[in-house]
């Protein structure tokens, strides 16, 4: 089981960074509608087979986000 809510996570990280999803889309050179589709798709970000393998091995999946250090 994937414990993260990807849609909420992206929205929170956008708020923390002071940008909108549209601005995020622009910065990664895609459309805001594509970004929205990707984060709303239930099995689009984490491969469903990977989730099933980890579940079979007795694990849940929890993503941890680590802020990059300034370069």
Image: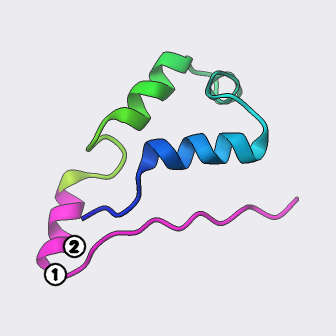
Residue 57 placement, left or right of 32: left
Crowd band around label 2 with a 10 angstrom C-alpha radius: few (<14), some (14–19), many (20+): some
Quadrant of the rendered image containing residue 24:
top right
**In the image, residue 11 above or below residue 33:** below
| Numbered badge on residue 57 | 1
- Magenta region, residue range: 49-71
- Residue 45 located within the stretch drawn in magenta: no
Q: Which residue is drawn at 41% across and 59% down?
A: 4
Residues at circles 2 and 1 in contact by the CB criterion of under 8 Å: yes
Res. 60 image quadrant:
bottom left
Marks 2 and 1 sit apart, C-alpha to C-alpha, by: 5 Å
- Dominant SS of magenta comes to loop
Compared across the picture, whether 1 is left or right of 45 comes to left
Indicate the quadrant containing the N terminus: top left, top right, bottom left or bottom right.
bottom left
**Residue 60 colored in magenta in the image:** yes
Q: Residue furthest left?
A: 56
The spot of residue 3 in percent (x, y) is 35, 64
- Residue 34, horizontal then vertical, whole percent: 46, 22
Q: In this view, does 28 lie above or below 67?
A: above
Q: Where is residue 54 in the image (x, y as percent from the top left)?
A: 21, 73
Check disc 2 and report the residue beneath it: 54
Where disc 2 sits, the SS reads helix
Task: Determine which quarter of the picture holds residue 68.
Answer: bottom right
Q: Nearer the viewer, residue 42 or 12?
A: 12
Q: Which residue is located at x 37 percent, y 45 percent?
A: 45
Q: Which mark is residue 18?
A: none
Q: Is residue 60 left or right of residue 24?
A: left
């Amino acid at each position: 089981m994937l414990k993260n809510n990807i849609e909420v996570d992206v929205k929170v990280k956008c708020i923390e960074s002071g940008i909108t999803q549209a601005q995020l889309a622009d910065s990664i050179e895609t459309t805001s509608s594509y970004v929205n589709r990707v984060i709303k798709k239930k099995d689009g970000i984490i491969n469903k087979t990977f989730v099933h393998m980890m579940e079979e091995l007795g694990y849940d999946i929890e993503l941890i986000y680590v802020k990059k250090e300034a370069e």
